[in-house]
């Protein structure tokens, strides 16, 4: 019995990854319960129940009071009770092990095989140990999975809810970071550091990297020979575009790099409010802003600053429009435009005290400029075509 018992413990340890002490505790509890049933039948229910298990030799002894119970005395019902308790305890221990194992992987990535496609989620088999759930809201727009396909995902949350629920995301920025750690040894070794990531899942990701070793090119390390490393990440993300940006302590240089491939002509920083005004040539404006504003939006998130992009031609055009005011010359118009008062409506709604703080504009001048802007705006409004009821046409 003792050899067989130790053999079973060893097998459960290997196959289920369960702790031997947990298994012995489960067997003890089961035998105590079974012994209580025997005690009731033999009018010994008041006697102390004691179970001794030698973890080295595998010897098991059960006592009711001073009397040792032999195995044949347990009977069918007591044996079944013991068996049910052992199975239940093993299942509980197994669930706890799985929870602890994957709880420790929150913020990391796991690989799994797609084995069920549901209406609201994709279910992964995680190495036969557990199920991973990817809710549809956590899928990238580019994700199209087939049964049996291998997939990597970011472990967003592990919770106990009718068992262990492992929530996986394919949209999280952390997925990109962890994929680069897998592909780029220099990142895993700490030579190259990922400083920040901005992602619009399924479309584009910008990743800022920095090398702690002057001999190692951080961008080159992430790209790999002939782009092999970044290609592997792109393939896992189903073709999502990735821009690798060189991080710099000089915020101006970092912002310039974040807006690549656009060429920046001038940068004006408002460090107190973390705002930056970018000036580009007219032919660079659409490139800097990107499709539907994506490039500037991602760059802004990457550097953590609000970015306003204008072209030289657009600013010159705004200056000319402001010069329609008789009280405003070219220099004052340029000051107003630089302060974001780049149209007559903005000036008409401005506070005189705020304008008075600008270079070359005093209190009286500010009031004069605002009054003149209001007058022009009101005249323009009165000239707008109206319908028969006197309302402005839409």
Image: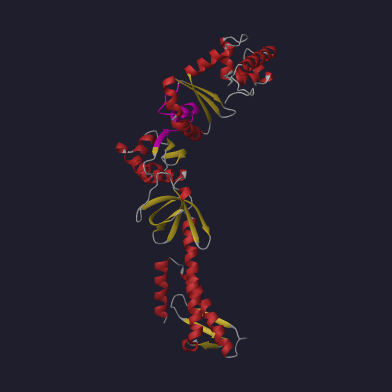
Which of the 4 image quadrants contains residue 281? top left
For the C terminus, the image quarter is top right
Residue 253 included in the magenta stretch of the image: yes
Name the residue rendered at 39%, 75% in the picture. Answer: 7
Q: Taking 51 as reference, is 188 above or below it?
A: above
Q: Position of residue 71 (x, y in %)?
A: 47, 86
- Closest to the observer, 25 or 302: 302
Q: Residue 327: x percent and y percent? A: 63, 9
Task: Determine the image quadrant of residue 11.
Answer: bottom left
Q: How many marks?
A: 0
The one nearer the camera, 98 or 151, is: 151
Q: Left or right of 345: which side holds 167?
A: left
Residue 331 % position (x, y)? 57, 11
Relative vertical location of residue 351 with respect to residue 177 in this rendering, above or below: above
The image quadrant where one finds the N terminus is bottom left
Q: Is residue 381 above or below residue 39?
A: above
Residue 256 drawn in magenta: yes
Q: Nearer the viewer, residue 285 or 274?
A: 285
Magenta residues (range): 242-264
């Amino acid at each position: 019995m003792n050899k067989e018992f130790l053999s079973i413990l060893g097998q459960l340890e290997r196959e289920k990854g369960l702790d031997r002490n947990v298994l012995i505790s489960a067997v003890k509890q089961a035998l105590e319960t079974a012994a209580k049933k025997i005690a009731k039948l033999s009018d010994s229910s008041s006697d102390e129940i004691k179970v001794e298990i030698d973890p080295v030799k595998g010897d098991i002894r059960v006592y009711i009071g001073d009397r040792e119970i032999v195995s044949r005395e347990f009977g069918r019902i007591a044996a079944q009770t013991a068996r049910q308790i052992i199975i239940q305890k093993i299942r509980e221990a197994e669930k706890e092990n799985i929870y602890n194992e994957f709880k420790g992987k929150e913020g990391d990535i796991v690989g799994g095989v797609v084995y069920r496609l549901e209406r609201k989620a994709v279910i992964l088999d995680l190495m036969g140990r557990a199920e991973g759930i990817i809710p549809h809201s956590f899928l990238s727009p580019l994700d199209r999975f087939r049964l049996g396909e291998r997939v990597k995902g970011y472990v967003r949350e592990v919770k106990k809810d009718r068992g262990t629920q492992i929530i996986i995301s394919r949209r999280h920025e952390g997925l990109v970071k962890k994929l680069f750690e897998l592909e780029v040894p220099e990142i895993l070794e700490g030579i190259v550091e990922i400083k920040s990531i901005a992602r619009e899942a399924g479309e584009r990701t910008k990743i800022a990297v920095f090398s702690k070793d002057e001999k190692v090119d951080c961008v080159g390390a992430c790209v790999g020979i002939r782009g092999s490393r970044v290609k592997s990440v792109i393939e896992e993300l189903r073709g999502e575009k990735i821009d690798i940006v060189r991080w710099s302590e000089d915020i101006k240089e970092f912002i310039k790099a974040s807006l690549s491939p656009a060429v920046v002509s001038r940068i004006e920083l408002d460090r107190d409010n973390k705002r930056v005004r970018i000036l580009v040539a007219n032919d660079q404006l659409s490139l800097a802003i990107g499709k539907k504003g994506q490039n500037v939006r991602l760059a802004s998130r990457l550097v953590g600053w609000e970015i306003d992009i204008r072209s030289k031609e657009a600013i010159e055009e705004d200056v000319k429009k402001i010069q329609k005011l008789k009280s405003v010359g070219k220099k004052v118009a340029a000051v107003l435009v630089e302060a974001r008062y780049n149209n007559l409506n903005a000036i008409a709604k401005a506070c005189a005290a705020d304008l008075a703080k600008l270079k070359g504009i005093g209190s009286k001048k500010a009031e004069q400029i605002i009054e003149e802007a209001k007058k022009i705006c009101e005249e323009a409004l009165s000239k707008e075509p109206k319908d028969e009821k006197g309302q402005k046409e839409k």
